Image: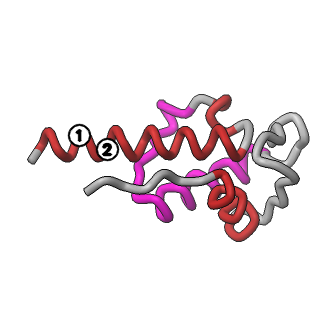
């Protein structure tokens, strides 16, 4: 089964609903603007895991992957593809 890509808009909606962060655009730097701090990042990671069925270990977290909604969407899509590939290999 091929998963449809996660869009920037979907990430912006998730940031608003789950992390209570209002993002002006998909390319807004969430760290530099102060919209995303360490606590909000943990909440966001939990929401991403729940919403998209991915696993994110703290050892693998690179802060640049969470700088903007567009980078978060790219990260989630990569993670989903890797997990789907791994599941296919394990089957």
Q: Position of residue 50 (x, y in %)?
A: 47, 63
Of the 4 image quadrants, the one containing the N terminus is bottom left
Q: Residue at x 36, y 42 (%)?
A: 81
* Dot 2: element: helix
Q: Residue at x 84, y 60 (%)?
A: 22
What residue is pinned by disc 2? 83
Answer yes or no: do the residues labelled 1 and 2 have beta carbons within 8 Å? yes
Dividing the picture into quadrants, the one containing residue 74 is: top right
Mark 1 neighbour class, 10 Å CA radius: few under 14, some 14 to 19, many 20 or more: few
Total number of numbered discs in the rendering: 2
* Dot 1: element: helix
Q: Position of residue 38 (x, y in %)?
A: 73, 44
Secondary structure mostly taken by the magenta-highlighted segment of the chain: helix
Alpha carbons under labels 1 and 2: distance apart: 5 Å
Q: What is the span of residues highlighted in magenta in the rendered image?
A: 37-61
What residue is pinned by disc 1? 86
Q: In the image shown, does 52 or 19 lie closer to the viewer? A: 52
């Amino acid at each position: 089964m091929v998963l449809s890509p996660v869009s920037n808009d979907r990430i912006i909606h998730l940031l608003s609903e789950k992390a209570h962060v209002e993002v002006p655009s998909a390319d807004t730097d969430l760290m530099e603007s102060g919209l995303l701090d360490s606590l909000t990042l943990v909440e966001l990671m939990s929401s991403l895991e729940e919403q998209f069925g991915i696993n994110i270990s703290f050892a693998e977290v690179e802060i640049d992957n969470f700088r903007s909604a567009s980078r978060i969407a790219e990260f989630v899509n990569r993670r989903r593809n890797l997990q789907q590939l791994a599941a296919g290999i394990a089957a």
